[in-house]
Amino acid sequence: MLIDDLTNSYDINEYLHSLKSSKKFGPQIVCHRTLPERAEEYSRPTFPLPGSAVHGLKTRGINELYSHQAEALDIIRQEEDIIIATPTASGKSLIYNLPVLEHYGKNPDLHALYLFPLKALAQDQLRGIRLLHSAVCGNYDSDKIEFAAIYDGDTTSYRKRKIREHTPPVLITNPDMLHLSLLPYHDSWSGFFKNLKFVVIDEVHTYRGLFGSHMSWILRRLMRVANYYGSNPQFILLSATIGNPEQLGRKLIGKSLRVLDQTGAPVAKKHILFLNPWDSAAHAASQLLEAALKRNLRTIVYTKSRKMTELITMWTKPRLGDRTSKLSSYRAGFLPDERRAIEHDLSSGKLLGVISTSALELGIDIGDLDLCILVGYPGSIMATWQRSGRVGRGLKESAVVLIGGEDALDQHFMRNPDDFFSRNAENAPLNPLNSRITQLHLHCAAAERPLSTE
């Protein structure tokens, strides 16, 4: 039986063995591939890090840089714009935080702008940069100044005013706030724009289609305002693995940039299973989730809708016994405090499982997970690998189970799994020359600064 009244912790291999041996689910498994582990590759930047940075990294358990981190640091030190397109959990945040801290040590008046598409990502990165700043610069400096702050829709009016009056070295926000609150009122941010050294844009692969076209114009307006105040910020773009990182980055910022798409980060062994259910995909997911949680396997389930998220939660919880409190849903519509509590509980291990829409697809730190269950094909190769990357961090062996849905593309991959594994990540389309979008942003740009034909 796959599901028993289990009380002890089991590893992922026992779970997979039970799944494949199950009379019910064994025949439904149409593919099982194992992605091998890969050892890490270390390197050093051309010029050594400052002693304070080396000491700070060691206190965080980081004794060496991966090869791609060292290479990216060299490129950034040469003041070149760059896009880093590497898999999830490859240490991308260190790539931009280290140069920011390095320049802050030389000139505390310089500023960096961090742009994230989700509030949860902003909160996660705020914690990360504060911890790294404290480790590198010491508690004295951390107590003396506020090194980083978030400016978004959840920020109170009083807090926003304080941030405008005393803008910290690192300002964390999102494209909407940049468009609506910073650029139109740039005179209130003159000191910030005058000393803007870095613009960091995370999850760049999300800026595609119409959203990406709008983003490209927001960034052009940002550069225009920064140039007006005498600065020429350097861009650091970060993305999941996509088919056209150089093209996407160039269209976003309107100029050429370096591409780094190889990683030196270690990769743990990962099992990929395709399961074509006799029952509905949602019912199969509920049963697989129940079996995983009863084995104390930390699990994330991705669904395609809020309704399915709540249905699977409702079906699974009553069968968990004393583990009921170990499972939660996560979706858009939750209050900010509710979202942060779930993220914290998942990261800390208080929660064993979470059922989510795409809201948890991006790089929020939710700890080391064992199992990812995809209820239906996510719609793209890129999204599939992005969600799969949520498990197997920290060199833990992990598994991903893709449960086929009823639509044609799901069933195509269930019947032809080789086709799935032979495909590369898709290109991210972007057209900054969309005439309607151009017209709208020209109006905004004219309101910010008079336009000229030059």
Image (cartoon, rainbow, N blue to C red):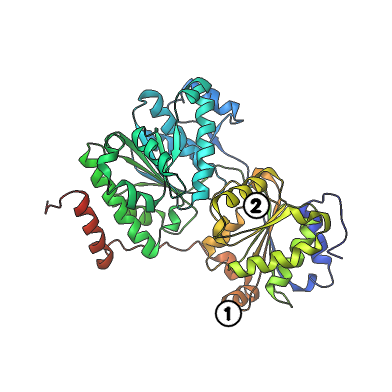
Most distant residue in the left direction: 453
Residue 189 lies in quadrant: top left
In this figure, which residue is indicated by the disc labeled 1?
408
Residue 310 lies in quadrant: bottom right
**Residue 120 visible from this viewpoint:** yes
User: Image quadrant for the N terminus?
Assistant: bottom right
Q: Is 238 positioned to the left or the right of 139 in the image? A: left
Numbered disc total:
2
Question: Which numbered tag is attached to residue 286?
Answer: none
Q: Nearer the viewer, residue 183 or 401?
A: 183
Label 2 Cα neighbours within 10 Å, binned few <14 / some 14-19 / many ≥20: many
Q: Amino acid at mark 1?
A: Ala
**Residue 376 visible from this viewpoint:** no
Q: Nearer the viewer, residue 124 or 54?
A: 124
Gap in Å between the C-alphas at discs 1 and 2? 27 Å
- The residue at 47%/57% (across/down) is 242
